[in-house]
Image (cartoon, rainbow, N blue to C red):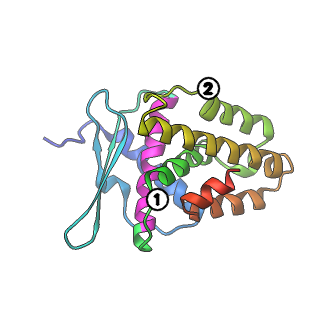
Amino acid sequence: MNPLTGFGVELIRAAEIQTAIERFYEIDRVVNVTDYVRAARDGEREQLLVREASDGAVEMMLELPRMRGDLDSMCQIIEGVSHFVYVAERASRDRASTALEMEIQAEVDKWVVLAGDVETLDVAKSAKLRERLYERVAYLHVESSELGERYRIANRAALRFLRRMERTCVAERRFGELRRELHAFFRSGQEEKLLRAQ
């Protein structure tokens, strides 16, 4: 039996999100995410599995939850595809990435994907999206755990960075500068991402 039977909506969403991310950041497709997706077990969240093969190639498998028609399941799919695109793009350039770096980028990519056409953004729309994505959140992992700390750092970094983008770019309708800043953020490593978020 095909493990993806009945998983079509999630695959379509994953393909659409990959296209949106690649178009926005003007990056070439390395591989199709849909060739590496499988359904997560009931109750499991998104997860990107990565390993280095004996020949040095990077192998990936993305587990995605089923769409439930809510923001959480959509954000999980965006986050998983963001991780997949980020690792694939980095691997194609022989660049490593850290787990924190991927999480920070995925937090920003949620805003990029859900904001849609950034040229139509205004401060009120951006603030509402920012508040929903970064300020009204609940964490599954306690703050003192490694994952809890990583997710909180990524959330706070994305919040600070996008709040600054609202003040300096969205409010002034400087959308070309907004795109340049987001492109530079995508191409930055962990330390530079954290500095850009200050």
Q: Which residue is drawn at 67% across and 51% down?
A: 197
In the image, which disc is placed on residue 136? 2
- When the figure is inspected, residue 138 is found, relative to residue 89, above or below; the finding is above
Indicate the quadrant containing the N terminus: top left, top right, bottom left or bottom right: top left
Residue type highlighted by circle 1: Tyr
Among all residues in the image, which is located at the extreme right? 172
User: Residue 89: image x %, image y %?
Assistant: 45, 66
User: Residue 5: image x %, image y %?
Assistant: 23, 39
- The number of numbered badges drawn on the structure is 2
State which region is magenta. 71-90
Residue type highlighted by circle 2: Arg
- Which residue is under mark 1? 86
Q: Which residue is drawn at 74% across and 43% down?
A: 163
User: Residue 43: image x %, image y %?
Assistant: 31, 27
Mark toward the start of the polypeptide (2 vs 1): 1
Camera-side residue: 76 or 122?
76
Give residue 33's quadrant in the image. bottom left
- When the figure is inspected, residue 143 is found, relative to residue 14, above or below; the finding is above
Q: Main secondary structure of the magenta part?
A: helix
In the image, which disc is placed on residue 158? none
Q: Residue at x 63, y 30 (%)?
A: 132
Whether residue 86 appears in magenta in the rendering, the answer is yes
Secondary structure category for the residue under label 2: loop
User: Residue 171: image x %, image y %?
Assistant: 84, 45
Is the Cβ of the residue at disc 2 closer than 8 Å to that at disc 1?
A: no
- When the figure is inspected, residue 189 is found, relative to residue 4, above or below; the finding is below
Q: Is disc 2 surrounded by few (<14), some (14 to 19) or many (20+) residues within 10 Å?
A: few
Distance between mark 2 and mark 1 Cα atoms: 26 Å
